[in-house]
Image (spheres, rainbow, N blue to C red):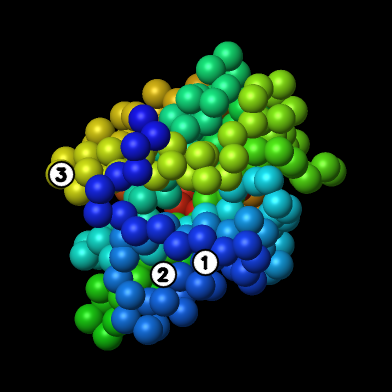
Amino acid sequence: MSTWPQGYALREWTEIDSTNEEARRLAAAGEHGPVWLRADRQTAGRGRRGRAWESPAGNLAATLLIVPGKPASECAQLSFVTAIAAADAASDFAANAEIKVKWPNDVLANGRKLAGILLESASGGDGALTFLAIGVGINLAHFPPDTEFPATSLAALGVSVPSPSAALSQLAAHFAKWYEVWMTNGFSPIQDAWLARAAGLGSRIRARLTHEETSGVFEGIDNTGALILREAQGRTRTIAAGEVFF
């Protein structure tokens, strides 16, 4: 699968502040992509909700700059496209591990976080996206200890660890395939593919929202990607944003 996908450019750095920041700068300078940006090391990597994202040398830190030409609400679905692609790439390298996706945009290996995804974008006056940055971090050689949700790495799984460049080649190839599916057929096949890889489906989970926590049975995701939770007394609730714990 590792043939570099046609039509995607690649830029690489030894060190950079953040590949997502570089995507923002390139977009401001008129770059539309698709272009993958990869750095050996980020000095100011970030994760969801503004958290710092550890990105030591040996791990994959990359961002895809793209302008899909679809409404912002639909482009949010690309976190699921990316999660599927990252899960498929992880499976290529760790064939014996249980690779799952965790709502909304993490990849797990044997129940621990292996990869995270961060989408950032800007819209013009007409509401259309002027750029979309899809940041992906995959723990290849290292993982951060003492995280709230336990983490792991390919090295910790005891498999042969690919170089960040090789890992990106796999990721980019899988992404291009699933992105084409999404562009051609919409979210439905992505929803099916994501649910086929979903961690915790049918089990009790805890969901942390902005101002509250709730728990219930994880029933799936709807046709927008929102989480479907069956709370007490059989009430069904859809959650558009939050964090999930098993």
176 sits to left or right of 230: left
Name the residue type under label 3: Thr
Residue that appears at 39% across and 44% down? 172
- The image position of residue 245, as x and y in percent, is 66, 37
217 sits to left or right of 54: left
| Image position of 17 with respect to 155: above or below | below
Q: Tell me the distance, in whole angstroms, between the alpha carbons under discs 2 and 1.
A: 10 Å
Name the residue type under label 2: Ser
Viewer can see residue 211: no
The residue lying toward the viewer, choosing from 80 and 61, is 61
Quarter of the figure that contains the C terminus: top right
Where is mark 3, residue-wise? 184
Name the residue type under label 1: Asn
Task: Tell me the number on the disc at residue 121.
Answer: 2
- The image position of residue 47, as x and y in percent, is 62, 58
Find out whether the residues at labels 1 and 3 contact each other: C-beta distance under 8 Å: no
Where is mark 1, residue-wise? 20
Dot 3 falls on a residue whose secondary structure is helix
Residue 51, quarter of the rendered image: bottom right
Badge 1 density bin: few <14, some 14–19, many ≥20, Cα 10 Å: many
